Image (cartoon, rainbow, N blue to C red):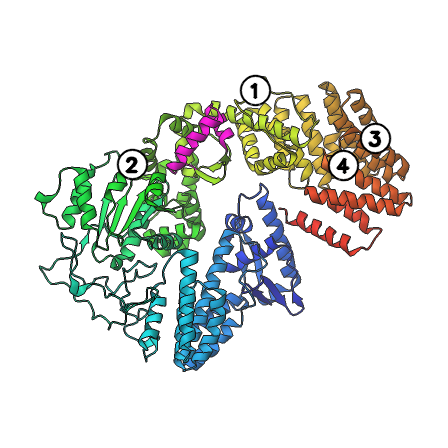
Amino acid sequence: MEFRLLGTVSVDTFTGPLPLGPAKRRSLLAALLLSANTPVSIARLTDSLWDDTPPLHARSVIQGHVSRLRALLVGADAEAYGVELVTLGDAYVLRLPETLLDAQRFEELLTLARGQRSPADAVLMFKEALSLWQGPALSGAFAGRPLQAAAHSLEESRLATVEQMARSYAALGEHNRAAAVLRAEAVAHPMRESLAAALMTALYRAGRQSEALDWFHRTRRLLADELGIDPGHELADAYALILRGDPEPDAGREGGRNAPDGQGTAARGPVRPSGGDGGSRGASGNVAVQADRPTGTNDTATAEPVGPPGDLGGAPSPAPPRPLPVPSLAGEPHPTDLLPRAPRGFQGRSAELAALTRAAAGEAPVCLVTGPAGVGKTALALQWAHRNAAAFPDGRLFADLRGFSDTGEPALVEVLREFLLALGVAPRRVPESAAAAAALFRSLTDRRRLLVVLDNARHSATVRPLLPGGTDCVTLVTSRHRLEGLIASDAARPVPLDVLEPPDGTALLAGVLGEDRVLAEPVAARRLAELCGGLPLALRVTAARLAGRPSWTLAGLADELADERSRLAYLDVDDTGVSAALRLTVQQLPQDAVHQLARLGHHPGSHFDPYTAAALAGTDPVVATAALERLAAAHLVTEAAPGRWVLHDLVRLYARGMEPEGGPEALTGVLDHYIATALAAADTAEPGGEPCFVLPEDYRRPVAVRDFGDRATAMHWLATERDDLALAADAARTAGLHDRAWRIILLQWPQVVWRVRDNWSPLLELALDSARSQDDAYAESRVLNLLGWVLTEEGRAAEAIALLERSPALARQAGDRLGEATALINLAVVQAEQGELDTALEDCGRAVGLAREERDAHTEMLALQHLARMQLTANRPNEALASVRTALDLGPEHEEIARRVLLLTTSGEARLALGEESEGILLLDRAAGEAERAGYDEGAVRALQALLRVTAEPEYRKRYEEAVRRLNDDG
């Protein structure tokens, strides 16, 4: 038995690969294999199986996939290989010998290859490692974010292996072979500069200098066209090596940039920061350049060498290598450095650090790090600044602009005074006005390579006078606001900062508490990271609490944090904490935005649009949109999609405490908003339907209700809002607003009909409890009707009939004749399935009569649809055709797609029963086509099943299998 991740996710056995089924099951297997022998929580698996908001029944889907995967492994005698899929509380662990996993064998072979003294032996082991790859990593799995990251990491390891194998070939003098293995990968990854540089070197060593130079210019043009950047140091060094006609291999040169001590030849023009060592010219970060002078000039003896004339594409000049830097002697001037110390325990953020490096590569760039309070903007800026220290030989300036502080912002002239003094200006020569000081600052920085870090900026206007004048200077700004004015006026390049992923959050805890303590409770550590919402400030406060209490367990603190009522209190230590950081942000907001934020804290759902926000705040969508824009600019809410906003968990808890007395009003407002919007959606999706139009006595219609232009838009809203509607109903039930709870649930009936087997029964049972708590016969009958039908479709006939037998009497008690008709229809469906066909036909006929008396075409059409199906089952095809024709005459063809598809299917089957095969096939094909075009997979499966009973047409088989697959994968 062998498990594969390096290619299509699969399990190979002696009898062939196991039939793993849909992509999400492969995703689950991949997630378990990537953490083999380690528990993987339901939350982590959910992240791996769904890219956006998971469905309400995600846990059930995962349990189903685990059950089927476990059965496959047991059937393949996995236990004999030491393989076992085990449930551990709220997690699963796939136990297996790591030798059965190709990714693990790949890593072991790499370790062995790197330890070989003989290049020939290393080549053999690298080849064997690469032979394990059978395509892109994790193919065939659904690419959720965690799996995308894992696949990217595996691919990076593979490419690094190719580069190492090429170096081993070079050590053997086999440069043509090195070029051959590198070329294939360089073609597939044209912007990977390390590959291009290695290929250029191999081609040059193989005597193919023109090809090497051609590859450089090709890559340089691509980088400029696609990314707008110049070649990095690896490409530049390879190009310089070729121009010099260097006789020695680059890998062995003491002066090469890849040499261990980091020494390298200087490039022509300004040195730009890189993502790694920052293009440093000394291992310690010291620079062999005389410190700056007040006049803004540098010593010409240590200036950068000027390249030769001609179009060299920014290549290094063929100057001799510089000597090692000599530590400065006492009394010599030092480069200016006002940076605070580098942050301790910094974790992750590789993508953001790389984004900063790219942003800093332009001309006089302004890099803008934005994000909510406590997300780690200052830490990121300082980490990048310290990593790239050597790229700024003329110094690094830092100022905390205190834009979100109780102490207020410093005077602009005071910040400029500090900068000018640091640059060597005598105190008596510092101008007294901010405008004159800013002008002198720009003049002094005009010819320097300087980094300016402006932390905690509140306004764009505060930043502009502090921008240096030199084209080789980089300005790094951090802010809780988006500072769009700075983007417009100075082409600032935004680098948004989001919360940490759970692995990085766990690593941050380990950096403070020590790895042993975190490794002793890995599940609790991850839970802590999740409860802190990935917010670095919250994680550091949590770690500080634990560090000062060695006897506390991580699980114990996680249990404390799980209580939302006290979570924020636990995340405050002394004068540092989440509440304090948020308070400083909120106090800068106008009152309407503060009111909107406070009301958002009482939102029972996970996301909101302007209509929802308006309902919570008691305003209209226009006012709410303006408030949301202000909150987004302050990074208190996030626009996850156009018109769709989310609130970080800790911000939500803080907001809830801002205006606790407004909670009941906000909740009632948003519940009535959901009722009004769901009514509009149901009326658009299924015109003529009448699920529950008797509104609560104290119902307040919102100022504005979303308008749905067509059925597709209405159904999309019901689908995307399903989870939040469920949360709203649960919140209504908890608050005792039962009249809202059952209505919000029942109004989703068009989606229930559309996706009947999508685990609706738990939600409908909640609605039934709410209806019964009010002794509301009308409500109870309506809920029983829908719940009974869902249970029937789920194959739970005995439970369904027990519920449905009570429904007609309840409807009569409430005087709800249409509800009685619906109850009789649903009861008849179950009776027919139980073999009581005569009783079913009688009850369904009564339902048709009640609907006609009430002149309700919608309910009559529904009754006729089921009556026709029962007549067909009773071998009365002519009666079935008559019922179908009557039903179709009741409603326009473009409405009620699901019902129309089912009627056409019944009509087609009736024609087949009468021996009219060609017409029956034509009707069934029409039904299947309409269902497929509408996305009604249940109807497509039914129609295509009937077709396959009379024809073996391959096209129908293919369409049937695709419809079944869509149904299975829909979870």
**Circle 3: element type:** helix
As measured in the structure, the alpha-carbon distance from the residue carrying label 4 to the one carrying label 3 is 12 Å
* CB-based contact (under 8 Å), mark 4 and mark 3: no
* CB-based contact (under 8 Å), mark 2 and mark 3: no
**Disc number lying in front (1 or 2):** 2
Earlier in the chain: of badge 1 and badge 3, it is 1
Image coords of residue 814 (percent x, y): 71, 19
Q: Considering the whole magenta stretch, tell me its main secondary structure.
A: helix
As measured in the structure, the alpha-carbon distance from the residue carrying label 1 to the one carrying label 2 is 41 Å
**Circle 2: element type:** loop
**Circle 4 sits on which residue?**
900
What's the residue type where badge 1 is placed?
Tyr
Q: Which mark is residue 404?
A: 2
Earlier in the chain: of badge 4 and badge 2, it is 2
**Disc number lying in front (4 or 2):** 4
* Range covered by the magenta-colored residues: 609-637
User: Is residue 251 covered in magenta?
Assistant: no
In the rendered view, does 530 fall on the left or right side of 550? Answer: right
What's the residue type where badge 4 is placed?
Arg
* Label 4 neighbour load within 10 Å: few <14, some 14-19, many 20+: many
Task: Please tell me in which quadrant of the rendered image residue 198 appears.
Answer: bottom left
Determine whether 363 is above or below 212 in the image. above
Q: Nearer the viewer, residue 553 or 125?
A: 125
Q: Nearer the viewer, residue 237 or 137?
A: 237
In the rendered view, does 618 fall on the left or right side of 583? Answer: right
**Circle 3 sits on which residue?**
886
Image coords of residue 920 (percent x, y): 85, 44
**Circle 1 sits on which residue?**
699
